[in-house]
Each structure stands twice: as C-alpha cells, then as structure tokens.
Amino acid sequence: MPDETINFVFLELNRFGRKLEECEGLVEQWCYALKHIGTLDRLPEELRTKAFERLFRACEVAKFSPEVKLKYESDMITERDYYNIIGTAEERGEARGRESGRAEVARKMLAAGMPASQITAFTGLTSDQLKEL
C-alpha cells in the first residue's frame, strides 16, 4: 500500500506582491489571478488559458446584481433544458433508426429463407417481433 500523504499550503494573497510579468510558473500565476481578479477589466494575455478564462467568467457572473444574476441563471437553465431536449430527441431518433434497420435486415433475411433462430441471434429481435414482420 503506497504511503498517502496530504500536503497543505497556506498562502496569504495580500502578501503576494509579484507583478504578472514577474510570475514564475503556474502557481504564481494563480496567486496573481486570485489576488487581482476583482480589479481586472479584462483577462491579461499571459493568463489566456482555459482555466483562467473559466475563472474570469465565473467572477464576472459573481459580480452581477441579484436581478441580473437571477436572469442569467434562468437563461442558463433554459439553455441546459434545450440541449437536454435535443440530446434526448437525438438518442430516441438513433434508437428508432437502429430498430428500423434491424427490422429491415430481418425482413431481407426472412425473404432469403434464413431460419428464424439465426435471424433472432443476428438481429437481436425476439421471435414475437420477427412474427410481426
């Protein structure tokens, strides 16, 4: 069993005094971003990565007034619902397409004189479904 340890680093952001161009590495960039995020009008070029862009967007939302934040959250719920509806419709359409395709293949197999046991094994259709064709 490997020796598992947990390390904690305590950082006082108000004591972090480096300018962005002085930051050496990702940890210092994070320290800079967390200390200055509330005063930045835009994301500096040096921090243009997906992680910092997500942080910046999240902080912009956090600065919204309660009314604007409520509207934003409502719009996000509507958008998520829309994408869920589309995704569900796509899944159902694909399932229907697979079912229709299996039925078509089974019809052709029946027409070619294949035994029902082989058709059900190959297509996954039940013998009752096969009889309905």
Image: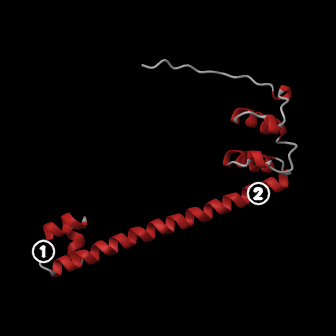
User: Whole-Å distance between the Cαs marked 1 and 2?
Assistant: 60 Å
Q: Nearer the viewer, residue 33 or 19?
A: 19
Which is nearer the N-term, disc 1 or disc 2? 2
Disc 1: CA contacts within 10 A as few (<14), some (14-19) or many (>=20): few
Q: Which mark is residue 30?
A: none
Classify 10 Å Cα crowding around label 2: few (below 14), some (14-19), many (20 and above).
Answer: some
Instruction: Judge whether 87 appears above or below 54 on screen.
Output: below
From the viewer's perspective, tell me whether residue 17 is left or right of residue 30. Answer: right
Number of numbered discs on residues = 2
Name the element at disc 1: loop
* Residue sitting at x 55%, y 19%: 5
Q: Nearer the viewer, residue 95 or 28?
A: 28
Query: At label 2, which amino acid type do we have?
Result: Tyr
Looking at the rendered structure, the kind of residue marked 1 is Met
Quick check: 56 left or right of 103?
right
Q: Position of residue 49 (x, y in %)?
A: 69, 48
Question: Vertically, is 8 above or below 123?
Answer: above
According to the picture, the residue beneath numbered tag 2 turns out to be: 72
Q: Is residue 99 left or right of residue 46?
A: left
Q: Quadrant of the C terminus?
A: bottom left
Is 38 above or below relative to 65? above
Rendering quarter of residue 114? bottom left
Determine which quarter of the picture holds residue 126: bottom left
State the residue at coordinates (72%, 61%): 75
Q: Which residue is mark 1?
A: 114
Q: Say which element carries label 2.
A: helix
Residue 63: image location, x then y, percent: 84, 48
State the residue at coordinates (59%, 21%).
6
Q: Residue at x 78, y 58 (%)?
A: 71
Residue 113: x %, y % from top left: 11, 78
Quadrant for the N terminus in the image: top left
